Image (spheres, rainbow, N blue to C red):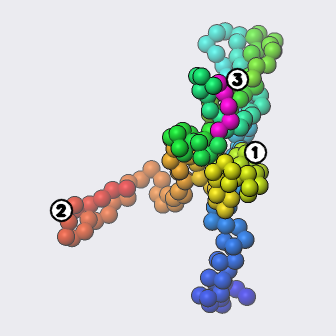
Amino acid sequence: MSSSTLTIDDKWTLVEAYFKANGLVRQHLDSFNDFIRNKLQEIIDEQGEIETEIPGLKVKLGKIRIGKPRLMETDRGDREITPMEARLRNLTYAAPLHLTMIPVENNIEGEPSDVHIGDLPIMLKSIADPTSQLPPEKLIEIGEDPKDPGGYFIVNGSERVIVTQEDLASNRALVDNGKTSSNITHTAK
């Protein structure tokens, strides 16, 4: 049966079946998981090494690693954080990024170092989110909804989702006429 012979009811049945099987946020989770599994390392590998201003010295970039979401406190040190704590304390649910770096002086490699290069916000229910592996009872215990599908970030305590947009004409201003009842004659996007 071709798509032209499907009725409106058939099409809605297909859409409902897709969302029932995959959920509303599957594409967000799949995209972020691919970024974590593959794209981050591909970016590092593409760069390869960093030239310095010191003659004969460069830094070779190695494996990138993502830790568990954590919080650094002056009085309590480093510890894991839950999404609910991030919400309640207006924090970002993020994990440390560590990169293996090897100094190379006059083509002689030095000792590799594991360097903290920053923190990466973690998408809830992604492979980098420890709560994605917890049973419903444990999720309830830490203040999470077991039916929460995830697919969003917690930044400064607020839940944020990435909204996809189609760019109709990249690097071009799109100008529309304003409403006739308004004093705005044109809008640009």
Instruction: Look at discs 3 and 2 and give the one toward the viewer.
Output: 3
The kind of residue on which mark 3 rests is Val
Q: Nearer the viewer, residue 20 or 7?
A: 20
Q: Nearer the viewer, residue 170 or 18?
A: 18
Q: Residue at x 45, y 50 (%)?
A: 171
Q: Residue at x 48, y 60 (%)?
A: 168
Determine the main secondary structure of the stretch shown in magenta. Answer: strand
Q: Is residue 79 magenta?
A: yes
Question: Residue 131's spot in the image, x, y percent?
Answer: 71, 49
Query: Magenta region: which residues?
Result: 77-81
Task: Give the crowd class for mark 2: few <14, some 14-19, many >=20 residues within 10 Å.
Answer: few
* 168 left or right, relative to 10: left
Image quadrant occupied by the N terminus: bottom right
Task: Give the crowd class for mark 1: few <14, some 14-19, many >=20 residues within 10 Å.
Answer: some
- Give me the C-alpha separation between circle 3 and circle 1: 19 Å
- Give me the C-alpha separation between circle 1 and circle 2: 51 Å
Asked if the residue under mark 2 is in contact with the one under mark 1, i.e. CB atoms within 8 Å, the reply is no
Secondary structure state at the residue bearing disc 1: helix
* Residue holding disc 1: 37
* Residue holding disc 3: 115
Tag shown at residue 183? 2
Pointer 3 or 1: first along the chain: 1
Pointer 1 or 2: first along the chain: 1
Secondary structure state at the residue bearing disc 2: loop
Question: Residue 83's spot in the image, x, y percent?
Answer: 62, 46
Residue 11, above or below 78: below
Give the quadrant of residue 87. top right
Residue 147, above or below 106: below
Residue 107, above or below 92: above
Q: Using the rendered image of the protein, determine whether residue 157 is visible from the camera's viewpoint.
A: yes
Q: Residue at x 32, y 63 (%)?
A: 176
Residue 186, above or below 73: below
